[in-house]
Amino acid sequence: MRFTPGVRGARLLVRRRRPARVAGARPPLLARLRVRTKLMLLVLPPVAGLLAFTVFSAMAQWNEAHTLKDFKASTEVSFATAGFYDAVARERLAEVLAQAAPDRPGTAADRNAARRATDRALTAAEGTASGHEGQPDVAGVLGSVDNQLHAVRLESGSGALTVAQIEQRYATVATYLLDTVRRLDSGRPTRASGRAGDAYLAVLGAIEAAARERVALAALLATPHPDGQDAAAGRWSALEAAQLDTFRQTASGPLRARLAGVLLQPAGRTVRATRETLLAAGGAQPQLPSLENWLTASGDRLTALRGIAHDAADELAADADQGLKAAQARGERELALSVGVLFAVTVLALVLGGSISRPLSEVSEGAKALAEGDLSYDVHYTGRDEIGVVADTFRELHVTSERLAAEIRTMSTAIDDNRLGHRADVAAFDGAWAQLLGGMNATMASFAAAHGRRRKAERELASIFHLSLDLLCICGTDGYFKRLNPAFERTLGHPAGTLLARPWLEFVHPADRARTRAVLDRLANGAESAEFENRCLRADGTERWLQWSARPVTGEGLIYAAARDVTESRRADREQAALRRVATLVARGDPPHEVFAAVAREVGMVLSTGPAAVLRYEADGAVTVLGSAHADTSAGEEAAAEVAHTRGPARAGRSVGAPIVVDDRLWGAVVAASTGPEPLPPGTESRLADFTELVATAIANADSQAQLRASRARVVAASDASRRRIERDLHDGVQQRLVSLQLDLRTAESMMEDRSADVSQQLAHIGKGLDDAFEDLLQISRGIHPAILSRGGLGPALRALARRSAVPVELDLRLPPDRLPEPTEVAVYYVTSECLTNAAKHARATVVQVEARTYDDVLEVTISDDGSGGADPGGGSGLIGLVDRVEAIGGRLGITSPPGSGTTLTVRLPLRERPTDL
C-alpha cells in the first residue's frame, strides 16, 4: 500500500511492490564506471583544453586586430592632418610674399586663395578627426592651430609683424602639426608598417625643411639681406638632407628610385645650384636667381616631393590594411579550429552522456515523485555505479516514506482540529527521520507560541494605527474606505461613519477629482503611487492639501495608503516664490513703481486677502499709496496709522501692517486687510516684514541711482559752463587782438612808400601767419563750445557740422520749432561731432546719415555710416565720455558695429524731467 499526504488528510493507493534488484542481468560496460569518472572523462580534459585554447587565442587575435584597427584609424587622421599642414605651409609662403613683395602681381590674390585652401583643409581635418579617441587630442590640436592662424592673419594683415616674425609664427604652427602627425603614426604594430611610417614621417620632415628654405630665400630675394645669406642657405638644406637619408633607409625601392629622379630633375638641379652659390659666396654678394625663377624651381621640386609623400602615405595605409586583414584571417582559422575541437568534445559528451543521462533521469524522476508525495513510482536501474547505489537506496526510502506519511497525516489532522499539543512518535524511527519528526514536534510547539504572539502583534498594530498623526487607511478598488485611523477625522472634520459610507472621491476638491481618479486607475492596475498631492474638503468647506503614498494589493482588491497634511508647507513654498519674484525685480533694478505694484500684488496672493498696498508717509502726515492690489485701500488705513504711531508691526481691526525702514527712518508701510469679518491669522505681521525688507532695498537702490545721475549731470553742466566761458574769453580777448594786429599790419603796409621786395615778402608772410593763427584759434573755439549752438540751436549747429565734415553727410532733421533744453542740444551736438570724426579717421566711411526726430517727449538721434565697423564702446575714452554725457541727463546710448557692416549709434534723450517714485 502507499499514501499521499495532504493538508487535511491522505489519499491511499494500492500497488504491487517491485523486487529490490533484478537478478541475473549483467550491466553494460560503461555502467560499471563510477559517475565521477564518467563526468571527468566527459567534461574536464576536452573542455579545459578547448577553453584555454579559445580564450588565449581569442585574446591575442583580438588585441592584435584592435591594435591594427586603431593604427589604421590613426593613419587616416594623420593623413588629414598632414594635408592641413601642407595647406599651412603654402599659406606661409603667400603671407611672406605679401609682406616682403606687396607690389608683386597676384600676391594678394595668392594669399587669399591660400587662406581659403587652409580653411578647407582645416574643415576636412576636423571632419576626419571627429571620431578619433585617445591621444593625441587631434580635435584640440586643430582648434588651437585655428586660433593661432587667426591671430597671425590679423597681425599680418595689420602690418604688425615683420617677414621673419611671420615665417617664425607659421613655422611654430607647422612644427606643432608635424609633431601631431608623428604621434598619430607612432603605433606601428608591425615591422612593415613601422618602416612605412618612418619613411612617411621622414619625407614630411624633408618637405618642411625645403618649404622653410623656399620661404627664407624668397624673402631674401624680395628684400636682400646679405647678413642672413649663409644661414638661409645651409641650415634647411642640411636638415632636408638628413631627413632624406632617413627616408632612403626606410622607404621601399620604388620610392627611393623616384626620389633619385626628383633630385635629378631640372628643378632639383636649380635648387642645388642656388644652394652651392650661396655657400660659395661667403660674405660677398652672390649671383642669385630671380624671385620668380626661384619660386618656380623650388615649387616644382616641392610638388614632386609631395607626390612622393602621397605615395609613402599610400604604402603606409596599404601596410596597415594588409596587417589588419592578415590578423582577421588568422582569427578565422583559429575559430575554425576551435569549432572542430568543440565538435569533437560534443560527440564525446553525447556518447558518455547517454550512459549517464538515462539512469539519472529515471532516478531523478523517482526522487521528484517522492518529493511530491507520490510513492507509486519505482526505479528499475540496477547498475554497479553510484547511480545503482542511489536506486537501491531509493527503494529502501520508499518503505520508510510510507511510515512517515502516516505520522504526517496524523500531525495534519491534529492541526486541522486545533490540537496544538499533539506530538509525533519519534521513538519509532532512527537517524535523520527521528530528527525530522523531532523537528516537526518543535515546529508544532513554535507554531503554538507564534499563534499567541500574532494575536498580541495585531493588538499592538491596531494601537499604532489609531495613534499615528499621519492619515492611514485601507481603501477598496471600488472607491470606498474600508478602514481609516482617527487622523482622518481630525484633519477633514468628518466623522468616521460619514467617511466610510460615501465614495471617498466626494471628499476630493472638484478641480482635482480627474487627476485623483487617474491615480486610482493606475493603482487598480498594480502600479504604486508616491507623493501624489490633491485637495480635500473639510466639513466646514475649507481646503486641505494632502500628499499621498499608496501601494495596491491587486489580489485582494485593496489599496494601502498613507497621507500627510502639507497645506502649511505649500503655503510657505508659495510665499518664498513670491519673495523670489519681488527680489528679482529689486536685483534687476526695475523702477520703484513696478516693484511697489508687484509687492502689493504678491502680498494679496500670498495672504489670500483682498486689499493690500504699499504706502509712503509724507512730511505733512499724509499717506500716499504707491502700489495696491485692490481698488479699495481704505481697509488698511487703521493699520497704517498704528504703524506710524508705533514704528513697528501692528494690527488694527481686520488689517495688519509692517513698517518700511530706510536708513533708520520710517519711510512707509505695507498693509493688508481681510475681506471678511474674520481677522487675518496670527503671524501675518512677520510674513509682511519679509516684503518690507525688499521694498526698503529697492528704495535705497533707486535713491543711490538718482544721486548718481544728479552728480553726473552736475559734472557735465560744469564742464559745459567752463567750455562756454573759455570760448567767450577767446572770442573777446585773443581773437580781437589778432584782428587788431591784422589791421595794424595792413596800416603799416600802406604807410610804407618805398619798400623793397624782401620787406614786402616778409610783411606778407607775417600777414598770412596772423590769418592762419586766427583760423586755428577759430577752430579751437568751435571745438571747445560752438557759438552757433548757443545762437541758432541744434538744427543749424548740426548743419554746420555736416558742412565741415570730411565725409559726406545726409541730414534728416525733424525737430520741433522751439528750442530744445540746452543740455540736450549740447549732448546731441557732441555725439554727432564725435561720430563724424570717427567715421572720417577710423571707419573709412563714404557717407554718414544723421536722423533726428521727437516722439512722446523723447528725442531720438540715429547716426549710421557704411564704414568698416568693429567699434568697441569700451575701447576708447571718446565713446565712454559720450555715454557719460548722455546718461547724465537721463538718456540712453546704444551702438551696433559688426565688423565690415558699418556702425549705427542711437541716442534717446528725454525732453522733460521724469518724476521720481520716491
Image (tube, grey):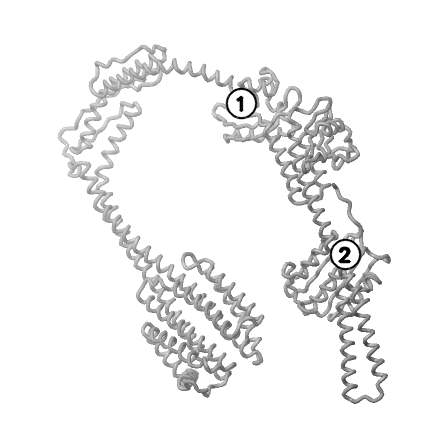
**One can see residue 477 in this view:** yes
Q: What residue type is labelled 1?
A: Asp
**One can see residue 475 in this view:** no
Q: What element carries label 1?
A: loop
The residue shown at (57%, 23%) is 479
The residue shown at (23%, 14%) is 426
The residue nearer to you, when weighing 685 against 823, is 823
Residue 2 found in image quarter? top left
Q: Distance between the residues labelled 2 and 1?
A: 66 Å
The residue shown at (64%, 36%) is 579
Residue 640: % across, % down: 74, 29
Give the number of the disc on residue 553: none
Of pointers 2 and 1, the one earlier in the residue sequence? 1
Q: How crowded is mark 1: few (under 14 residues within 10 Å), some or many (20 or more)?
A: some
Q: Outermost residue toward the left?
A: 24
The residue nearer to you, when weighing 561 against 206, is 206
CB contact under 8 Å: marks 2 and 1: no
In the rendered image, which residue does mark 1 sit on? 470
Q: Is mark 2 on a helix, strand or loop?
A: strand
Relative to residue 78, is residue 368 drawn left or right?
left
Relative to residue 314, is residue 430 drawn left or right?
left
The residue shown at (22%, 34%) is 359
Q: Which of the image's four quarters has the C terminus?
A: top right
In the rendered image, which residue does mark 2 sit on? 860
Residue 899 found in image quarter? bottom right
Task: Reply above or below: 372 against 721.
Answer: above
Residue 913: % across, % down: 78, 49
Q: Which amino acid does label 2 sit on?
A: Glu
